[in-house]
Image: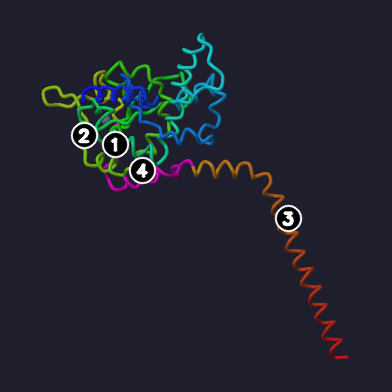
Amino acid sequence: MNLSNDIDTDSSEEMMAWITQYCSMFGHDYFVEVAPEFIEDDFNLTGLSSIVPFFRDALDVILDLEPDAPIKPSNVPLVEHAAELLYGLIHARFILTKQGLHLMAEKYEENCFGSCPRYYCEGMHLIPVGRYDQPGIETVRLYCPNCNDIYLPSSSRYLNIDGAFFGTSFAGLFIKMFPEIEKQCKERSKSQFSLKLFGFKLNEKALCGPRMKWLRQYPKTPSEIAEFDQCEFESPAVEELTHEEDQRDTLDEDDKDDIDDDEDDDEEDEELQDVRMSAGESMMSIAKD
Ligand SMILES: [Zn+2]
């Protein structure tokens, strides 16, 4: 009995897919397992062949396929590295799909990405985010939807994970996809800690005063909230006005021509009416005749 059990576990370890193995590695717990069907669809890999070296070999490694030609032993570490890069870039695309978003939501609920270190965020769960979509620029950061700030992961084990493996679009889409997150943010207090000296608040202009406080301020009065809601989806009214003014400035010279054209149009209209009138009269005269 024991023997057969041993054989089973051995075979399951051997059969462990590359993706499962990669995601279960130390420090890779931010990753979700990308569905092989997603990787097999060439459309989802558009443009990646120009970024990732040894693209075909790396793809075969990820999908546990036998390569067409054996890889040179000297290239094996390069191909393995390319496979990790390719998987990360596919991962950034996969987590934008419905399936990927739901898998990430499970991790988010389990608090796999950690909590916001800011005291007044009351342990708000963080979302992994990259500041750049190009690999090799910056490592992964964690976004707090409550204070709208990004933080470094608390453990150094995540400091070699590229931010591009999560991308710039994920956090925004994730929050819009799951409105519960916005609800959680609304329930949390928006209070900020401010220093006091013997009960008196420090002046804004003091060196140790609450400078840059406006960065974390939220609208309070109904008019402020209305302005905020408007600004979230459209450009503020001030910008629109300046834009119109710019247009007016550029049109000033053409305006005169336009007016002339209008006058011409009027004259033409009158001429047309005259023609019609005369035609009508002639018709009347014909009828009379
Ligand atoms: Zn926060």
- State the separation of the CA atoms marked 4 and 1: 13 Å
Q: Please indicate, yes or no, whether residue 101 appears anywhere in the rendered image.
A: yes
Q: Amino acid at mark 3?
A: Asp
Which of the two discs, 2 and 4, labels the residue nearer the N terminus? Answer: 4
Q: Which residue is mark 3?
A: 261
- Tell me if residue 221 is in the magenta stretch: yes
Q: Marks 3 and 1: CB-CB under 8 Å?
A: no
Q: Which residues are magenta?
A: 216-239
Label 2: state its secondary structure. Answer: loop
Comes first in the chain, label 4 or label 3: 4
In the figure, residue 107 lies in which quadrant?
Answer: top left
Numbered tag placed on residue 177 in the rendering? 4
Furthest residue toward bottom: 288
Q: Amino acid at mark 4?
A: Met
User: Of the residues tagged 2 and 1, which is closer to the observer?
Assistant: 1
x then y, percent, for residue 124? 24, 33
* Residue identifier under label 2: 191
- The amino acid marked with disc number 1 is Glu
Residues at marks 2 and 4, CA–CA distance in whole angstroms: 27 Å
On the rendered image, what quadrant is the C terminus found in? bottom right
**Percent x, y of residue 89:** 46, 27
- The earlier-in-sequence mark between 2 and 1 is 1
**Residue 199 found in image quarter:** top left
Q: Residues within 10 Å of mark 1 (few under 14, many from 20)?
A: few
Decide if residue 215 is in sight here: no
Q: Which residue is mark 1?
A: 106
